[in-house]
Amino acid sequence: MNVKKRRSIRLAAVLSVSAAALGSVLAAPAVAAEAPSCIATSTSTSGIYKMFYADNNCSNQYRIRFIIAYHADSDCGTVFPGQRRTITIANGTPAYLERIDLC
């Protein structure tokens, strides 16, 4: 086998491995699942604050994240059965609770 042919075979092998690696990097990110309906949400305002609540009426604990439109989403946190998780932000922004996702 001549040198040119060996180089082209090596190049083809490198390109196919690179393409496979790039495909896995560019794959769509995983979509978080929404919290079950037994996690009830509510919102209230008090002066300069807006509060978002998630009440766990389920029989299991869940790790949840508040997805807030026009504001940064919350970190993941555990909410146990019968407990409430609260996120407080500044009032006066157009932010609203879009949904609760599982982490």
Image: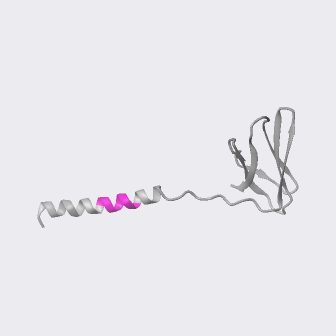
Quarter placement of the N terminus: bottom left
Left or right: 57, with 62 as reference point: right
Residue 57, image x, y percentages: 86, 59
Residue positioned 69% across, 42% down in the render: 70
Up the image or down, 31 lies above or below 91; here it is below
Region in magenta: 14-20
The residue closer to the viewer here, 103 or 87, is 87
Outermost residue toward the left?
2
- Asked where in the image residue 50 lies, by quadrant, the reply is top right
Residue positioned 68% across, 42% down in the render: 72
Up the image or down, 55 lies above or below 48; here it is below
Count of numbered labels shown in the rendering:
0
Left or right: 42, with 66 as reference point: right
Residue 20, image x, y percentages: 39, 61
- Asked where in the image residue 11 lies, by quadrant, the reply is bottom left
Residue 53, image x, y percentages: 83, 48
- Asked where in the image residue 74 lies, by quadrant, the reply is top right
Residue positioned 14% across, 60% down in the render: 4
Q: Find out whether residue 19 is within the magenta segment.
A: yes
Residue 28, image x, y percentages: 53, 58
